[in-house]
Amino acid sequence: MTMTPRTNNMLSTDDLNCTTDVGAHAAVGAADEELPTVGHFIGGEAVTHAQRHAEVTNPAQGRTTGRVALADRQQVRDAVDVAAAAQRSWRRVGLTKRAQVMFRARQILEDRRAELAATITVEHGKVLSDAEGEITRGLENVDFCAGLTHHLKGEYAEQVATGVDVHQVRQPLGVVACITPFNFPAMVPLWMITTAIAAGNAVILKPSERAPSAALQIAEAFREAGLPDGVLNVVQGDKEAADQLLIDPAVAAVSFVGSTPIARHIYSTCAAHGKRVQALGGAKNHMVVMPDADLDAAADAAVSAAYGSAGERCMAISVVVAVGDIADSLVERIRARAESLRIGDGTDPASEMGPLITEEALERVSGYVDGAAQEGAAVILDGRDLRGPAEGYFIGPSLLDHVRPGMKVYDDEIFGPVLSVVRVDSYDDGVELINANSYANGTAVFTRDGKTAREFEFDIEVGMVGINVPIPVPAGAFSFGGWKDSLFGDTHMYGPEAFNFYTRRKVVTSRWPESSESQVDLGFPTH
């Protein structure tokens, strides 16, 4: 299936593939005012008023389907005020009642799984099965947060000194902001907001303006589950809204998933304003294939992990590291599988891979493939030549061999269906290659040897590791996060570490002496 070749112009570094869009947008013209508007959800009410709007497109059709309201700074400040007022009451709600909200919200979202998946597919482009999969992974964290009574337990020690007891409690931060990406419009919000709410905070959720509607459906589900108005607010917007959240004095913490340049900016800005921040950045995930690996299983895994969701995943495999003399055989297996993938509209059950999110993304990814050939990589499969639907932002899977560090296709996060193969002589060479990379989100090794697997786990300097698992996204009871330029901040996302992020500790030291024991003592207490 060949696609009509597209323009191959590379965009500048400033235009790098941000997995969340915080850039400015031109206002939608008057001729588009009849389009349906995706608005905000503030204080339990829909708000559609805005001075500016951006287009919402169906990437499989390449056409505008609606417009999204873009909040200005004053609207963000108003939403924060609403959240702050609601949080003061929400933090007083008993833990059991909070848990009941989680249970009910989970059931509502499960009942509406098909509707939510359809929304994701229309706005993002991923196939329906993939959309449902991200909902499942998001609901894992709702399940985890339903156990909030356990997760919010404090500590107690009696008689730390004569007649003195000490206890420690977890208390919410207040208002927190969650800035989420276009590529997981349901999963990442559910990773963030559920823990924040369970811990007693109020939330301002700013989804990507590229895929804005899923956040509203999630907020409505929580409202129906009994969450008080104002505890969860959705503010649509671009850079103006995001920047206000970063500096607003009433916002105590910011969670973010996106590209490394923006994650770094968010981290430094929040730190300068005294906020807690967890900012997850880009990735360049390597999958090492050892000579003893099952090459058919490794090829299946590489194709699934590289081309699923058109490569628009921060946990996608973008580099296969072939160790020893297996490279030719492995590349041929990957080529045969990738070439047979069915590319089309995500609403078609026969489609295995949908479009990229925008025309700009299509041009950028195409440019990387063109640039790789110019830099000396072997283009085994050129996605620009694979035919697909005439409309929409489609590109086929690309497979590049003999890729080396220093090539842009290796050094940059492409965020598209482009898989590079790097050949190395030994296990040690593969580990050195990965550890030298500035990204350290996820990695994997395929081997039949337990000793090699254990050494890889020990040696590799990456936050999430798969052993014969190509996309090692942890289960909901663990936490998600990379190292190096893939994470700015000290705390990983969802799971146990998220409860640490969304709460602060308060230590209380108490003593109940008899009045006759009281005396003046200017010395520092030692017992």
Image (tube, rainbow, N blue to C red):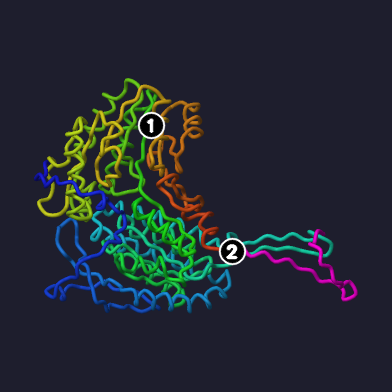
Q: Residue 448 in the image: state x and y as whole percent.
A: 43, 27
Q: What element carries label 2?
A: helix
For the C terminus, the image quarter is bottom right
**Amino acid type shown at disc 1:** Leu
- Could you give the CA–CA distance between mark 1 and mark 2, rounded to whole angstroms? 44 Å
Q: Is residue 192 above or below residue 386?
A: below
Q: Is residue 118 left or right of residue 218?
A: left
Q: Which residue lies furthest to the right in this view?
A: 516
Residue 518 on the magenta segment: yes
Crowding at mark 1 (Cα within 10 Å: few <14, some 14-19, many 20+): some
Label for residue 68? none
Q: Which of 123 and 96 is in front in this view?
A: 123
Which residue range is magenta in the image? 505-527
Q: Which residue is drawn at 42% across and 35% down?
A: 435
Residue 411 on the magenta segment: no
Q: Residue at x 42, y 66 (%)?
A: 177
Q: Is residue 495 left or right of residue 108?
A: right
Label 2 belongs to which residue? 149
Q: Residue 53 in the image: state x and y as whole percent.
A: 22, 71
Crowding at mark 2 (Cα within 10 Å: few <14, some 14-19, many 20+): some
